[in-house]
Image: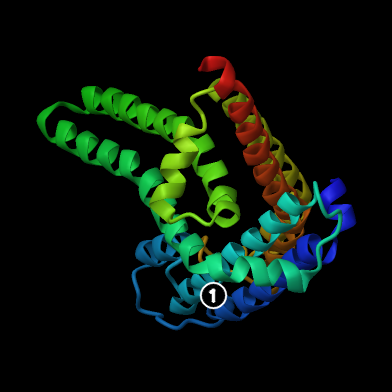
């Protein structure tokens, strides 16, 4: 929290502006879902619910999601620079942080794509294996094997989570390429992997709980103001605004903290590894 208090503009301020802007665009993108407005009145109801849940309808929602991903990369890169410089320079201006982070944005986007691939790979393999086994076996066996396969996929994602967490700050601070950042992050965990894993899991649990609690009243209000005869794809203006407000406040409450925490986890792990190397030698 000391990093955020000393540098409110490039951390909390930048995150709040970015999140608020994206939220405004998101509201505009989802206006076709308001009750009484039907872009495709003859569309199948179940399909419409599915594509809305997946975030691919209305089509403008996908554009907003892409903008948010790019904006979050920039906010994260700037926050990582600020947190890393905090040990030597207590305060870092937004202009200075931007000038240091800007050359790394393209590489950071590439790392984000690799992160998605790393996370989805075990899930896709589990889904493919579950489908293949379901075709050959009965429903009882299929349910059991599907549970086992997706449990293993989830454990795999949790196992590589520390690598993904510290690779982001490492890429920006050490000016690495995306693939090199992942390999270096994995190598950095040869000492103290379980300690880092526990800290990462605790950090993300806290972030998830806080974000959920902050947004919970707004989620309840959004559900209460949703059209009574509508499906999950139908919204009123009030429910849309309540849901968006809850998301905004939840993200503002945790995003700056998460960015700083990830950078400090990287710095701590690097310092511990460098300290342990002469002893191991």
Q: Is 209 left, or right, of 189 in this rendering? A: right
Q: Residue furthest left?
A: 136
Which residue is identified by label 1?
33
Q: Residue at x 63, y 76 (%)?
A: 27
In this rendering, the answer to whether 131 lies above or below 10 is above
Q: Residue at x 58, y 16 (%)?
A: 279
Q: Is 202 left, or right, of 145 in this rendering? A: right
Q: Position of residue 259 (x, y in %)?
A: 68, 51
Say which element carries label 1. Answer: helix
Q: Position of residue 217 (x, y in %)?
A: 78, 52
Q: Quadrant of residue 166?
A: top right
In this rendering, the answer to whether 71 lies above or below 145 is below
In this rendering, the answer to whether 61 lies above or below 143 is below
Q: Residue at x 80, y 61 (%)?
A: 12
Q: Is 76 left, or right, of 193 in this rendering? A: right
Residue closer to the observer: 176 or 155? 176
Q: Quadrant of residue 246?
A: bottom right
Residue closer to the observer: 226 or 216? 216
Q: Position of residue 152 (x, y in %)?
A: 36, 27
Residue 234 visible in the picture: no
Residue 249 visible in the picture: yes
Residue closer to the observer: 192 or 14? 192
Q: Quadrant of residue 242?
A: bottom right
Q: Is 131 left, or right, of 87 in this rendering? A: left
């Amino acid at each position: 929290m000391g990093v955020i208090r000393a540098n409110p503009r490039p951390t909390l301020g930048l995150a709040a502006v970015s999140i608020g802007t994206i939220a405004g665009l998101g509201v505009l993108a989802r206006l076709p879902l308001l009750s009484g407005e039907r872009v495709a009145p003859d569309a199948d109801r179940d399909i419409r619910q599915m594509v809305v849940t997946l975030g691919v309808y209305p089509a403008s929602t996908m554009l907003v999601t892409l903008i948010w991903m790019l904006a979050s990369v920039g906010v994260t890169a700037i926050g990582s620079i600020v947190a890393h410089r905090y040990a030597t320079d207590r305060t870092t201006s937004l202009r200075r942080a931007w000038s240091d982070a800007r050359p790394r944005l393209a590489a950071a986007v590439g790392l984000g794509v690799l992160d998605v691939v790393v996370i989805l790979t075990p899930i896709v393999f589990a889904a493919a294996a579950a489908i293949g086994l379901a075709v050959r076996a009965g429903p009882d066996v299929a349910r059991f094997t599907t549970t086992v396969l997706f449990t293993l996929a989830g454990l795999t994602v949790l196992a590589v989570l520390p690598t993904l967490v510290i690779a982001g700050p490492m890429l920006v601070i050490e000016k690495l390429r995306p693939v090199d950042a992942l390999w270096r992050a994995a190598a950095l965990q040869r000492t103290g992997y379980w300690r880092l894993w526990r800290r990462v899991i605790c950090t993300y649990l806290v972030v998830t709980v806080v974000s959920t609690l902050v947004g919970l009243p707004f989620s309840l209000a959004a559900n209460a103001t949703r059209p009574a005869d509508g499906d999950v794809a139908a919204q009123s203006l009030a429910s849309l605004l309540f849901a968006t407000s809850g998301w905004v406040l939840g993200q503002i409450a945790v995003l700056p903290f998460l960015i700083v925490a990830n950078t400090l986890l990287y710095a701590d792990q690097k310092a511990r590894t460098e300290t342990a190397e002469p002893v191991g030698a």
